[in-house]
Amino acid sequence: MTMPGIEVVFYTGAIGLIVIGMAGVLMVKNVFRMLLALVLLEAGASLLLILSGFRETGVAPILLSGHAAGQLMNDPVPQALVLTAIVIGVGIQALALALILRIKHRYHSLDMGEIREQMEHDIAVNSGVVSPASAQSPEPGGHHHG
Amino acid sequence: MDNLILVVILPLLAAFLMPAMARTSEVLARVTGLMVLFISIIIITSVWGSVDEQAVSYAIGGFRPPMGIVFYIDQLSLLFALLIPVMILLFWPWNKVTHIREYSLMMLLTASASGLVLSGDLFNIYVFYELLAVASYGLVVAQGRAGKKGEGAALAASLRYLILGAVGSVMMLIGIAIIYTQAGTLNLAHLALLAPEKLNNMAGLSAFALILIGVGVKAELFPVNTWVPEVYGAVSTRLSALMAGLLSKLAVIVIIRVLVLLFPQPEALQLMTILGMLGVISGELVAWRSRDMIRMLSFSSIGQLGLVFVAFSIPGDMGLMAGFAVALHHLLVKPALFMLASGWTGPLESLKGAAKQSPYIAALFVLLVMSLLGVPPLPGFWAKLLIVVNLASQAAPVYQFALAFVLIATVIEAAYLYRVVMILYHPNQGQQASVREKHKAFELVIASGAAVILIAVALQVQSMETKLSSMARQTGDRQHYINTVFSKLDLADIYHQNKVQQTDFRSNNQLQGSK
């Protein structure tokens, strides 16, 4: 497929957003920034989806009476899809934000490493593997007999 | 067949009406949920007989495909459409005082899960998958394990699950974008028609890899399964049973549908084999090291799902059949084991002599575990045998590796399950035996029911085999899918439309060589 002119810029932008978002989700420690990276990632994916129906010389896909037949149009289907994807994305981001708020109240931290440590400790305490008093990391240590 | 759409609409409607109804009458709202589940079961059983060798498609709103969205109803989707309300009903949280929100989420789960298995449109599947994901994030928070440490763990587990799930969804969306760029349609039957020509290339393969990893989050696929032990450790065993048993299989079905219909290249299968066998070996190894029952079962679930992926990656109908056998077997056994585990919390050592205290429960556990492992007369054996025999008959080296991995994993599985059984039947009582919480009645009923079904299947292996192979043949038949969704008239229409579209929308969208 040939991608002349402006499409190259758009594709670079979409893929760039995806790369930045992915790198952010993987490398950032702060959960709120992680969420922001997720927003970038979703924006990149949406842009990519829009581009799949984009024609450089295309017009808006509205059939008017005076419309010349056979004129190149942008594909409306991806636009409808992206609208759905954006709405879903916003919903999930709002849910994540609510969770982050409640986690902050409980664990007093936004650092993913600390949250994970406290969570694993809580899980281990709850399933009775370690006693509540021990503040050590609850990861299963050495002794098991096979 | 027309009222099958109610299976999606009614629970969805109920999910949003129930909180409003609860303001006037709490009882009414609760009863509504149960009623909807019963109605769903009745609707599905009423159409049960009409789908056998010939699948049926239903165009929603009368819009004909490929423009409209279709439901595709074959043996596979109908079986799962029935299993969903039945399993939701079994694990319905009715014995405690629950907030109405939780019932609402359960209804949302039912609606989206039913839509997921019935839908014949890729983007529709994406939307239902997202709905399912949101419902499960919510349920993880709502059904956190009791105890003062429970809520925090459930919140954190849910957030970590959400972030992984959201990244997975984005990957799936990118995969869908690639498919649309290549083929210019999202209707599965239309895509199946175009796939050999449009998707049999590197772009198609990368789209499959993205969808596999994206949907794989829910299916506990190897690199994206870090949420499994966290979530199952933080939520009630009731929800773990539902998620490990049912939800993971739904994601697997989405992957299988997409794989069979859209991606003919052998590399797609081999990618799945590799991820599957890494899942088997890593899951079983960590399960072997874990110190409490629920953690062990979570990792064993990762291992079993890996086995399901290995089975489905074997080319041809035999692979599909082996996959269905393992998946359905796991769907039956793992929830039952989770139910038994809920009364056996704490470190494994504290379970010493539990068999003396409750001999019936221990016997149930041994039976289920033996089937999970694949001890001969039980169904698990036949499922594993199918995998091993079919892996051995494949020439490609990756399948020989997979065979070795599966056998090694089975040995590891045997080692840790044997250890647990030995602890249960230890002659001395553990120290915590007296303070251990009792199994609840419904947990025992579910586990006993699973055991009865296991034995019944073991006695009826022959007829089960015929059913599974007929289901596998139907699922694997791409032409059948296309012919079911499109009438001859439609096919002619598509050909015509694609020619028109070529001048209007897209330049690479022409249907060549189709009949």
Image (cartoon, grey):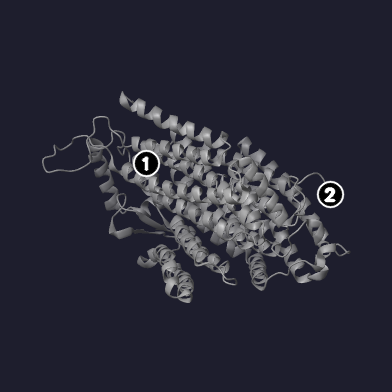
Number of residues whose C-alpha sits closer than 10 Å to that of mark 2, classed few (under 14), some (14–19) or many (20 or more): few
Q: Secondary structure at mark 2?
A: loop
Indicate left or right for A57 with B283 as reference.
left
Using the image, determine if residue A4 lies above or below residue B133. above
How many numbered marks, from 0 up?
A: 2
Question: Residue furthest toward the top?
Answer: A5
Question: Residue furthest toward the right?
Answer: B428
Label placed on residue A145: 2
How far from the left and from the top, in percent, is residue A33? Answer: 52, 38
Q: Secondary structure at mark 1?
A: helix
Instruction: For marks 1 and 2, give the CA distance.
Output: 56 Å
The residue nearer to you, when weighing B89 against B342, is B342
Q: Is residue B201 visible?
A: no
Label placed on residue B194: 1
Indicate left or right for B244 with B430 as reference.
left
Choose mark 1 or mark 2, whichever is in front: 2
Label placed on residue B99: none
Q: Is residue B77 visible?
A: yes
Question: Residue furthest toward the left?
Answer: A66
Quarter-of-image position of residue B506: top left
